[in-house]
Image (cartoon, grey):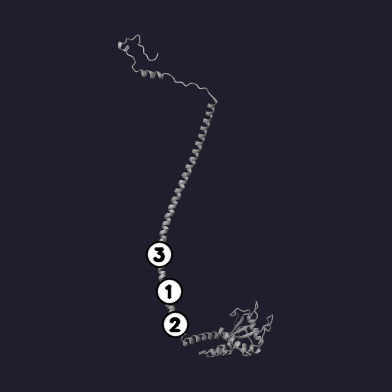
Amino acid sequence: MFGTKRTPPMTPTLRTEQSVSEPELAKITSELDMNITTRKRKQPECDCTTQLSIIHADIKESLSEWNNGLNAKLSTITDDIKTIRNDMETYIMAIKKEMDSLRTDNISIKKEVIKLTEEVAEIKKSATYISNEYDDNQKRLNTLEESILSKDVHQGILKTLEAKIDNLEQQARQCNLEISNVPERRDENLFNLIEDIGKKINTATPRDEIVTVHRVPHAAASERPKNIVAKFKTRALRDNVLSAFRLKRGVTSTDLGILGAPRTVYVNEHLTLQKKQLLRETRDAARKWNYKFVWVEYASMIWDPFYAKYDHAIERVQQLL
């Protein structure tokens, strides 16, 4: 029996102890309850419980797999984030270096621009000064030209100088002959040609008396053969060849052993451009007035210190034209 206590028989007890009862009934009751085993009533097993267990196990396994997959993905994402963070830090450092370099370059460029601006300003000043000087010189030149053109004396001086230069050029050609209308050949020997001309006109032209011989281009484009200029050692030989050629008359390319259609060969003094122009105008005047012959002789004697003979020749030709 629970809840009561017995007095041992052999041990004497006081009267007071036998009459005393347990005052804490609630405590006794709680101890009694603790000694009672609580059991659930056994429930019968069924299919629903089995299915629920299976479903619970599947759900638990799926959640576990999903959790593992999610953890793996989170780990990958974490690694990617770390990689991206490292790359971003690297890029940021590189950008900072580039920015620092650009700042340094910008400072240098600013200094160069300032320097160039100063130099351009100096150049502008110099250009302005030169332009002003040019304008002043141009004004002076115009004044001088007006002064020169307004005076007949200066015109006469210029004309005399031009004539003197032309005469000096003609004197330099006083030993030359100009042969025209001779067909050109690929491997022609012009020294032999001069010798053949001498034989044809019965005047000896030995090779050692010929200084140079070559073809010269025309002043204007032309389909005619290039003229041949021959320079002799002496003016006397040049004059003898020219006189004999004019006496012979009618020498053709066939007479000189050149194959092809015969062409009339012409031999004249080697004239300057001005004198050739005068000769051309003279021939035009001769045709107009029915003159039979026009020739040039001693061309270097046409000019004198006062330009009188040359002027007279030009005026006469102009009158005839």
Please tell me the numbered disc located at residue 144.
Answer: 2
* Tag 1 secondary structure: helix
The residue to which callout 1 is attached is 131
User: Disc 1 vs disc 3: which is toward the camera?
Assistant: 1
Three-letter amino acid code at disc 3? Lys
Task: Mark 3 and mark 2 in contact? Answer it, CB < 8 Å.
Answer: no
Residue 41: image location, x then y, percent: 48, 21
The residue to which callout 3 is attached is 115
- Whether 15 is drawn above or below 148: the answer is above
- Whether 295 is drawn above or below 133: the answer is below
Q: Quadrant of residue 219?
A: bottom right
Viewer can see residue 277: yes
Viewer can see residue 240: no
Seen at 42% across and 76% down, the residue is 133
Q: Residues within 10 Å of mark 2 (few under 14, many from 20)?
A: few
Residue 37: image location, x then y, percent: 44, 19
Spatial CA span between label 3 and label 2: 43 Å
Q: Quadrant of residue 197?
A: bottom right
Quadrant of the drawing holding the N terminus: top left
Relative placement, left or right, of 222 versus 102 is right
Three-letter amino acid code at disc 1? Ser
Task: Mark 1 and mark 3 in contact? Answer it, CB < 8 Å.
Answer: no
Three-letter amino acid code at disc 2? Leu
* Tag 2 secondary structure: helix
